[in-house]
């Protein structure tokens, strides 16, 4: 037994020796073995530095009175004065209110519509029809808002197709793009129409993971379609719904710049102007570089906090972690 134990110990020591040697390898030897992998990383690292890290230097514009002639280094340092100017603006409150209300409306209605569509589509047993409907509903997601916005501008105009149909039915015309009360709902509903098909994909995947044995057992016990939906289907996808709702909090200040830029007009600035469009109009078109950068930085800081909150809630409520 002692000879056998010593033999096992010798084998274990011999097996551990190469591992110890590999841990003490120099960087030169590792480079010789894996240099192709490091070379493959060079394009991604270059893009990261040029387009992600280097532009962070521009954040300094938020703390100076930027003068394009003098440059960033020669502009006068003003500290937090630009942020005080933003908070003192007359339209600051309405801009933040519009951004949050439109973004939250899109998140809530988009999630509800995607879940309902996924539940309805899951009930279809004819697979070719289900696949066709899924492709058709997801197709608008891949279309640019420049195209969809141009079509909507023509359809929803005062003499567009929708108002012509309403007047043919004896109903009054609706100013979808010119009424301050209706314009936010136009943005929310159009965004929901564009994205609900693509958003339902993850819920359909969650539905397919539910065991068919549960439905068969419930059917044997006499449970109808409504009871199976209530006690099996919805609880089965509830963690996914909670997870997606929590993660969507990170977009609470992202109301959709491209969509609103295409559809926005001065008549509905009161309820349709958001942070991104205001930054574009004041910073780029108006030449107030410091104000625009300060407002963009403020939005980024708040958005970063909301992203952290969303992942914390996802961990607590849905047991989801990325690290």
Image (cartoon, rainbow, N blue to C red):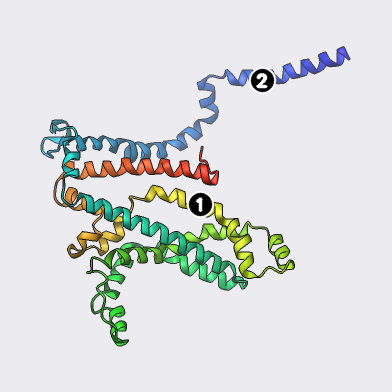
Q: Position of residue 184 (x, y in %)?
A: 29, 63
User: Residue 242 has which mark?
Assistant: 1
Local secondary structure at mark 1: helix
Residue in the picture at 38% in, 50% down: 251
Disc 2 target residue: 18
Classify mark 1: residues with Cα within 10 Å, few (<14), some (14-19) or many (20+): some
Classify mark 2: residues with Cα within 10 Å, few (<14), some (14-19) or many (20+): few
User: Residue 271 has which mark?
Assistant: none
Q: Relative to 223, is 313 on the left or the right?
A: left
Q: Tell me if residue 41 comes above or below residue 189 in the rendering.
A: above
Q: Tell me if residue 298 comes above or below residue 241 in the rendering.
A: above
Instruction: Using the numbered discs, state the Cα–Cα distance from disc 1 to disc 2 in whole angstroms.
Output: 48 Å
Q: Relative to 281, is 7 on the left or the right?
A: right
Choose mark 1 or mark 2, whichever is in front: 1
Which mark is first along the chain, 2 or 1?
2
Residue in the picture at 86% in, 16% down: 4
- Are the residues tagged 1 and 2 within 8 Å (C-beta)? no
The residue at the far right in this view is 1
Residue in the picture at 30% in, 58% down: 258
Q: Tell me if residue 322 comes above or below residue 18 in the rendering.
A: below
Q: Quadrant of the N terminus?
A: top right
Q: Position of residue 78 (x, y in %)?
A: 15, 33
The residue at the far left in this view is 69
Local secondary structure at mark 2: helix
Q: Please name whichever residue, 311 or 20, is drawn nearer the observer in this view of the structure.
A: 311
Q: Position of residue 130 (x, y in %)?
A: 56, 70
Image quadrant in which you'd find residue 121: bottom right
């Amino acid at each position: 037994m002692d000879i056998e134990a010593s033999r096992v110990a010798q084998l274990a020591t011999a097996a551990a020796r190469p591992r110890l040697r590999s841990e003490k390898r120099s960087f030169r030897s590792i480079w010789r073995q894996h240099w192709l992998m490091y070379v493959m990383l060079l394009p991604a690292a270059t893009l990261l530095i040029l387009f992600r890290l280097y532009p962070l230097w521009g954040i300094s514009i938020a703390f100076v009175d930027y003068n394009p002639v003098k440059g960033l280094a020669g502009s006068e340092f003003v500290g937090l004065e630009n942020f005080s100017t933003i908070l003192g603006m007359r339209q600051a409150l309405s801009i933040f209110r519009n951004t949050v209300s439109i973004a939250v409306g899109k998140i809530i209605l988009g999630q509800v519509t995607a879940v309902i569509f996924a539940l309805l589509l899951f009930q279809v047993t004819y697979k070719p029809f289900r696949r066709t409907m899924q492709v058709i509903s997801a197709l608008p997601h891949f279309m640019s808002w420049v195209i969809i916005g141009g079509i909507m501008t023509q359809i929803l105009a005062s003499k567009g197709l929708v108002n012509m149909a309403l007047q043919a039915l004896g109903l009054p015309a609706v100013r979808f793009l010119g009424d301050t009360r209706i314009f936010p709902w136009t943005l929310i509903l159009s965004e929901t129409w564009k994205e609900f098909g693509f958003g339902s994909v993850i819920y359909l995947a969650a539905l397919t993971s539910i065991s068919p044995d549960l439905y068969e057992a419930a059917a044997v016990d006499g449970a109808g379609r409504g009871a199976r939906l209530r006690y099996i289907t919805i609880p089965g996808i509830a963690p996914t719904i909670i997870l997606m709702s929590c993660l969507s909090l990170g977009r609470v200040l992202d109301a959709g710049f491209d969509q609103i830029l295409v559809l926005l007009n001065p008549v509905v600035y009161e309820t349709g102007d958001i942070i991104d469009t205001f930054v574009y109009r004041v910073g780029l078109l108006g030449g107030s570089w410091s104000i625009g950068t300060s407002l963009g930085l403020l939005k980024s800081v708040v958005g970063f906090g909301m992203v952290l909150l969303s992942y914390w809630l996802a961990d607590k409520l849905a047991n989801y972690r990325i690290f």
